[in-house]
Amino acid sequence: MDNAAGAEVLEAIAASALRLAGVLRGTVDISTGGDLAGSPVPVGVPATCPSAGVADIPPVSTAGGPADGPVPGAFAAGPSAADSDPLGWQAEACLTVLSGAAGLEAMVAAVKVHAAGGYDEAGQAIAGPIMSPKDHTAQDMSIVAEVACALTVSERTAGGLLGEAHRLRSALPLTLAALQAGTLSWQHARIMVDETTNLEPAAAHALEAHFLDPEAPNPARGAAGGMVPGRFRAKARTWRERHHPVSIEQRHTRSAVDRRVEYSPDRDGMAWLSAYLPADQAAGIWNRATTAARALQGPTEGRTLTQLRADNVAAWLLGGTLHSTPPATPGGTLDITQDGAAGRIPSPAAQVLVTVPVFALMGLTDEPAVLDGYGPIPPSMARALVADGAESFRRVLTDPRDGAPLEIGRESYRIPKALRQWLRLRDGKCQFPGCSNQSLDNEADHLNAWANGGSTGISNLTQLCPKHHRLKHARPWQPTEATKDEPPGWISPTGRHYHSEQPDREPPHWPGAAIDAVQRFHDVQGFPGDPWALSNDQPPRVPVPLE
């Protein structure tokens, strides 16, 4: 970005900010589209939250997905709209201004990226030729220090900004373009930088295009700005694990060498104890602690689920027994009898789903399996869980054609339990917009109430955490229709529509021997059509690993 372009961007942002400030002060006539005419807002409507007639403020996607509801500015038609429904006008106006402000923040972040990168280039050019590594280090330190002083931040923060700016400007054009347009937040952009680090250029471009290419056919793609940052990171990391040039088996073997337990003292007589473990072990410990804590809850138990979980882990590690009698106060300490026993609390099996591609389960490919609540794991870990017959894990096989689930292991014969497992497989987490709760305590809920004739089928169920389950029944948040493969969207009390988070499945990788065998069998039998298509009029679905 040259100086002239930079000045134009800054001028445009300043104009938008000035117009927004005028609206907030109530000095902008919203009925004329936001010109600084000095007219007050309509009578009876507070000036604290104006309409969204600010044309230069870009709309951004909301936490649960792009919002389809009332068009931004729907209450900007003039005093008549505000007079007929002043509270609705105010609510829509405030939400639209919040969305617009988020877009402006993203645009300002893009300006900072260009400015930081431009200063880095100018500073390096001014310094002239670097004669030694020592001089190069000194020059980099000087640039970082100057940016830190200009922004009044630490040099570590300034160095991070310079690195992110370089990555965005040199390797992630779609991300930078979305940031400049105000449709992708700075948090999302930083996640993209982080998840593409150490990838080959082709792999980094493919990851970026997967989430930011609006022409992508998969509905899970092209919607990065519609996910909260935590969910976007999880999806980006899953894609990265699938397509990393180094197999997840090799990376897991290397990382497992660093497993450890760490102790860190904290304030007020407290301390942190953390463990870096293989994912299956960590997930098993977490879910066992959660299930045991849930078993202790009751009308007379004063401790929270979080406190009970911590108390259980402490009891197990210290070799004592955790009593179910609550302490005097919810914040009281753990009551453990040092009797050397493993504890009186039963340890119910935590039902964890393990999704395994068929060929990976057979040992023919190295593509990752997926551990419910965590993400991709090495196929050897998944095979071990299945071979050991671990009661706390449920195997889910995927179709070798398109990656869709085939069936859930048949250890359980009762239909309600199988339905709950399928629901967890489809939804993965609480399906309320922006919620990332993946707890085993999430609750199945009828979209169309049973009392109203709703069925107990997968297309009429969703998974909600206790908090959002209560909210659904206490306030008019309405779920939309679901299908066997897609969870529902939501309509808010203000009428905005938030799309569901779509599954992001990919066809498994076929080993060469399997491809040859299927083709030979198809030819010998004289079957018509394409053996790799789901039907004769569909294109082949034989993915090639990204090297």
Image (spheres, rainbow, N blue to C red):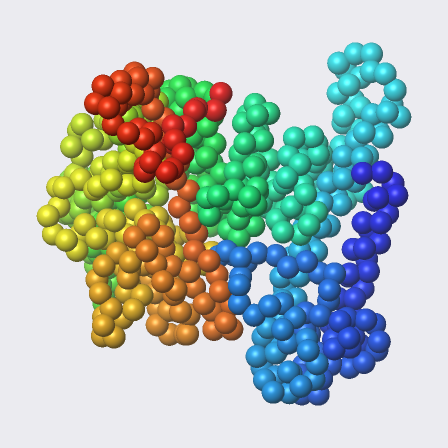
Image quarter in which the N terminus is found: top right
Question: Looking at this view, is 2 or 281 the one in front?
Answer: 2
Question: Looking at this view, is 182 or 284 the one in front?
Answer: 182
- Asked if residue 459 is positioned above or below residue 313 in the image, the reply reads below
- Asked if residue 358 is positioned above or below residue 5 in the image, the reply reads above
Residue 446 lies in quadrant: bottom left
Say which residue appears at 43% left-offset and 24% top-offset: 544
Q: Position of residue 196 (x, y in %)?
A: 56, 31
Q: Position of residue 24 (x, y in %)?
A: 73, 72
Say which residue appears at 29% left-offset and 58% top-offset: 459
- Asked if residue 122 is positioned above or below residue 414 in the image, the reply reads above
- Asked if residue 190 is positioned above or below residue 83 in the image, the reply reads above
Q: Position of residue 51 (x, y in %)?
A: 68, 73
Say which residue appears at 24% left-offset and 40% top-offset: 406
Q: Is residue 137 left or right of residue 262?
A: right
Say which residue appears at 50% left-offset and 56% top-offset: 65
Q: Position of residue 225 (x, y in %)?
A: 56, 50
Q: Is residue 235 left or right of residue 77?
A: left
* Res 286 visible: yes
User: How many discs appear?
Assistant: 0
